[in-house]
Image (tube, rainbow, N blue to C red):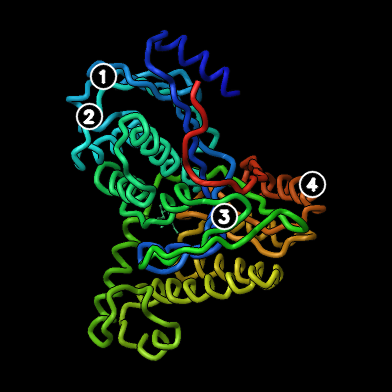
């Protein structure tokens, strides 16, 4: 829906008032490499994408939060006194969680009319949740003149996810959604929060996202289990090395001491994290030197490690990647996001995209019985105000 249509719809839903309607946008994200490294204080390399969430917001001077979405028939009126009750509609819990974080920081958020409109498929691993969180956070910050900077909005959105949603996620998704830049990937050190934008303009190669249509929900997936396994592995390593996170462990040191980890499952989990961290550094170097073939190979190695050592891929993702890698003009293909379903990202020659989609769609459907969907995103900037109307 276009912005002026959204505004009309907003007025139809909530009526006219003297208060101004503000419009905000937060992108989704695709991670290029560095998967399951963020909560281990390692490196990541995501991009913000043109699929995202619009939010039209206006103060209503009452004690109620009125929420609705253009995506499906839905609206809710929630009393501000009841914000801490979990809502049965999962997406509503993201704004509720964020508002509570503003309260926690002493900000008096009053009644609001909120109208969301998003085009990121839910549960596909493209961070629809961080997108809703950040779009809410920038809106509250603006409407109530809270004065938080983007790092604070990123942190409080992640806290909302931990405390209200119950997913022990790392910082990657909220960070890229808040700090993305047009035509650039974001190379982030999750331990120090230092980052640089690495140019990734569309040219000979494009990023192509393929949705396996195997839906997963992080809250009931094995995500928190993997977080716990990493913590268990870290405690074993700490018996011989002074490190505070797995991100500090080099691949060489890991190989020297891996024998002390008796449990083969924990050993594999750590191997993934430590080797993936190295791959991010190599990938950034490759990208900076326009070595796209090298970059593609690292994407492939990343997927293989997530499949064999971290065990977060599954039949649909592996099938999609296997078919994608066979296509002409493909330099690399891997799952993106948490895994367990959702999307893959492939680095594909621009001229080969049409054929890629045709061939992959047919073979994937044949092998899985699922009709995939493809997205060719633009790489865009982070969350913010769009305009006022
Ligand atoms: C999810 C989490 C992120 C990150 C990825 C895996 O998207 O929200 O913090 O851990 O999975 O890399």
Q: Secondary structure at mark 4?
A: helix
Mark 3 or 4, closer to the camera: 4
Mark 4 or 2, closer to the camera: 2
Left or right? Give the position of 352 relative to 169.
Answer: right
Residue with the mark numbered 3: 317
Task: Name which residue lies at 67% across and 49% down.
Answer: 364
Is residue 232 among what the camera can see?
yes
Q: Secondary structure at mark 1?
A: strand
Residue with the mark numbered 4: 354
Dot 4 alpha-carbon crowd within 10 angstroms: few under 14, some 14 to 19, many 20 or more: few
**Screen quadrant of the N terminus:** top right
Q: Which one is nearer the viewer's eye here, 220 or 15?
A: 15
Left or right? Give the position of 281 relative to 226.
Answer: right
Pointer 2 with pointer 3, Cβ within 8 A: no
Q: In the image, which disc is placed on residue 64?
A: 1
Q: Which one is nearer the viewer's eye here, 369 or 245?
A: 245
For the residues labelled 4 and 2, the Cα–Cα distance comes to: 47 Å
Q: Secondary structure at mark 2?
A: loop
For the residues labelled 2 and 3, the Cα–Cα distance comes to: 37 Å
For the residues labelled 3 and 4, the Cα–Cα distance comes to: 21 Å
Dot 3 alpha-carbon crowd within 10 angstroms: few under 14, some 14 to 19, many 20 or more: many
Dot 1 alpha-carbon crowd within 10 angstroms: few under 14, some 14 to 19, many 20 or more: many
Q: In the image, which disc is placed on residue 83?
A: 2
For the residues labelled 3 and 1, the Cα–Cα distance comes to: 42 Å
Residue 351 on image: x %, y %: 82, 53
Pointer 1 with pointer 4, Cβ within 8 A: no
Task: Name which residue lies at 34% across and 36% down.
Answer: 141
For the residues labelled 1 and 4, the Cα–Cα distance comes to: 48 Å
Task: Name which residue lies at 67% across and 51% down.
Answer: 208
Going from N to C along the chain, the mark reached first, 3 or 1, is: 1
Q: Secondary structure at mark 3?
A: helix
């Amino acid at each position: 829906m276009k912005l002026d249509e959204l505004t009309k719809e907003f007025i139809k839903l909530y009526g006219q008032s003297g208060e101004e309607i503000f419009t905000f946008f937060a992108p989704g994200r695709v991670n290029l490499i560095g998967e399951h490294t963020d909560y281990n204080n390692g490196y990541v390399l995501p991009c913000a994408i043109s699929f995202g969430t619009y939010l039209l917001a206006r103060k209503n001077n009452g004690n109620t939060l009125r929420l609705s979405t253009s995506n499906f028939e839905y609206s809710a009126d929630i009393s501000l006194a009841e914000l801490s009750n979990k809502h049965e509609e999962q997406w509503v819990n993201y704004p509720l969680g964020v508002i509570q974080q503003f309260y926690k920081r002493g900000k008096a958020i009053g009644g609001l009319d909120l109208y969301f409109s998003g085009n990121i498929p839910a549960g596909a691993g493209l961070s629809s949740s961080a997108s809703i969180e950040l779009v809410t956070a920038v809106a509250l910050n603006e409407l109530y003149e809270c004065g938080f900077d983007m790092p604070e909005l990123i942190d409080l959105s992640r806290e909302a996810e931990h405390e209200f949603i119950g997913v022990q996620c790392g910082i990657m998704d909220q960070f890229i959604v808040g700090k993305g830049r047009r035509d650039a990937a974001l190379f982030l050190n999750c331990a120090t929060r230092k980052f640089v934008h690495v140019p990734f303009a569309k040219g000979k190669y494009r990023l192509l996202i393929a949705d396996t249509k195997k839906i997963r929900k992080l809250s009931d997936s094995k995500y928190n289990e993997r977080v716990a396994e990493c913590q268990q592995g870290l405690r074993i390593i700490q018996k011989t090395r002074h490190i505070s996170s797995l991100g500090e462990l080099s691949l060489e040191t890991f190989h020297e001491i891996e024998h002390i980890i008796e449990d083969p499952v924990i050993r594999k989990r750590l191997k993934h994290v430590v080797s993936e961290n190295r791959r991010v550094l190599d990938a950034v170097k490759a990208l900076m030197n326009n070595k796209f073939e090298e970059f593609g190979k690292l994407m492939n190695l990343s997927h293989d490690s997530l499949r064999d050592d971290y065990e977060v891929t599954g039949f649909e993702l592996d099938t999609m990647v296997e078919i994608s890698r066979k296509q002409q003009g493909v330099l690399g293909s891997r799952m993106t996001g948490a895994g367990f379903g959702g999307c893959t990202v492939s680095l594909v020659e621009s001229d080969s995209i049409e054929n890629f989609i045709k061939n992959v769609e047919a073979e994937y459907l044949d092998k899985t019985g699922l009709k995939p969907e493809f997205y060719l995103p633009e790489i865009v900037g982070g969350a913010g105000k769009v305009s006022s109307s």
